[in-house]
Image: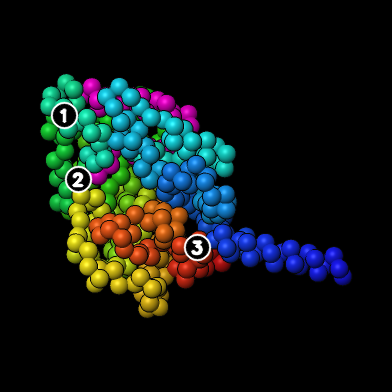
Amino acid sequence: MIFKKNRRAVSTAILIMGAISGFSQSIPSLKDAFKNDFGIGTALNNSQIEERDPALTQFIVSQFNMATPENVMKSALIHPKWDTYDFVVPDKLVEFGKKYNIKINGHTLIWHSQLPSFIRGIHSKDSIQTFFNDHIKTVASRYKDNIFSWDVVNEALNEDGTLRKTVFLDYLGEGYIAEAFRLTQQAAPNVELYYNDYNNEQPAKRAGCINLIKKIQASGARIDGVGIQGHWHVGKVPFKDIEESILQYAALGLKVMFTELDIEVLPRNFQGADVNQRMASNPAMNPYTAGLPDDVQQQLAADYEALFKLFLKHKDKVTRVTFWGVNDGNSWLNGWPVRGRTNYPLLFDRNNQPKPAFYKVIGLKK
C-alpha cells in the first residue's frame, strides 16, 4: 500500500509538472490519429529547432511527424551576403528531424520576400541570374539527402492568377519558375518539389496556378505537388473552393498538401497572407486579450472539424497537413497584419493544451 501511494504521488507530481510545462502525456497524438491518412506537420522557429525548452520538444515530437522551418531557410537568413551562407540553424533543423524521425520540408528556395539586403543593390540580369543559380544549387544540394521536400517557389502569383511582379520576373522573365524547378531537381534529385501559395484555392488564382503548373510540366522540369497554405478566417473557410482545388490539382498528377494552416479569429479588412500588407493598431482590432469567447471558440472548432472531414474524404490526394505554428502563442498572426495582437488560430493554446477544435479533429478518428 505504501508503494501504491508513493507511485500515485509520483504520478500526480508528473502530471502537475506536465501541466506547468504545457505538456501532458494524456493528450492524444495528432500524428498517431492520422498516421494512415496523411502527415501532420508544424512550423518550427529557432528556439524550437534548438530545443531550448525540453518539455516543448517532447510535446512537438508527440504531436507531429513533419516540420517546416518558419524562417531559417529563407534566403535573407541562409544567404545573408553575396558570398556567405549561414547553415548553422538549418543544419540543426536537419539534425532535429533525424533525431526525432520528423520529415523536414525545406521552405523556401525562391521567394520575392525576405530576400538578402544585397539584392537591392543589384541591377543587372547577369547578377540576378548568378544569385538565382548559385542559391538554388548551393542550398538544395547541401540538404539533398536530409530533407523530404522543397517549396521550390513560393507565392509567385497575384490574386487574379497573373504572375506577381518580382525581381526574378523583372530580370529573368516568366521562365524563372520552371528554371527553379529544373535547377532544384538537378541539385536534389530525390527530393519532392512543390509550388506553394496562399489563396490558390480561390477560382481565379487557382486557374493561374494550374496554368503555371502546366508550364512547368511542359518545360520538362519535375513538379511533384502543390501547397495550399490555408490561411483562412473563422466562419469564412471556403470549403467548396478547397474541395474543387484538391480535385483539380490532383487531376494534374500532383500531390496536394495544406502547408501553413491556421484560422484567423481577429478582425481584418483583407484576405490572404501577403506579408507586406499591414493594418494600423487600435483596441477594436485586438478584442480578445482576456480570452476567446465561447461562441468564437465553438465556431473555430466547427471549422477545423469540417476541414479535416474534407481532408479525410480526399486522403488519397492529400499527403500532408501542416499547421503554421505549434501553439497560439507561436503564431505569426499575433504580429501580422497588426503588431502585438492576441490571436487564437491553432489547435493548442499558449500552454500547449488542447482546445475544443483539437478534440473535434481527433474525434473524427474515433
Residue 156: x and y, percent? 22, 42
Residue 142 painted magenta: yes
- SS at circle 3: loop
Q: Quadrant of residue 2?
A: bottom right
Q: Is residue 47 visible?
A: yes
Q: Is residue 243 above or below residue 48?
A: below
- Cα distance between the residues tagged 1 and 2: 24 Å
Q: Of the residues shown, which amino acid type is indicated by label 3? A: Asn
Find out whether residue 243 is within the magenta segment: no
Query: Could you say whether the residue bearing mark 1 is in a helix, strand or loop?
Result: helix
Q: How many residues crowd around disc 1 within 10 Å: few (fewer than 14), some, or many (20 or more)?
A: few
Q: Residue at x 63, y 61 (%)?
A: 17
Vertical side of 210 occupied by 289: above or below: below
> In the drawing, does residue 79 fall left or right of residue 43?
left
Which residue is label 3 attached to?
Answer: 351
Q: Which stretch is magenta? A: 129-155
Viewer-side label of 3, 2? 3
| Disc on the earlier residue, 1 or 2 | 1
The residue positioned 25% from the left and 57% from the top of the image is 337
Left or right for 154, reference 39: left
Which residue, given by chain and number where applicable, does mark 1 sit on? 121
Location of residue 57 in the rendering, given as x and y in whole percent from the top left corner: 54, 49
Q: Residue at x 13, y 24 (%)?
A: 124
Q: Few, some or many C-alpha atoms within 10 Å of disc 2 (few <14, some 14-19, many ≥20)? A: many
Q: Nearer the viewer, mark 1 or mark 2?
A: 1
Where in the figure is residue 266, as x and y percent of width and height? 29, 67
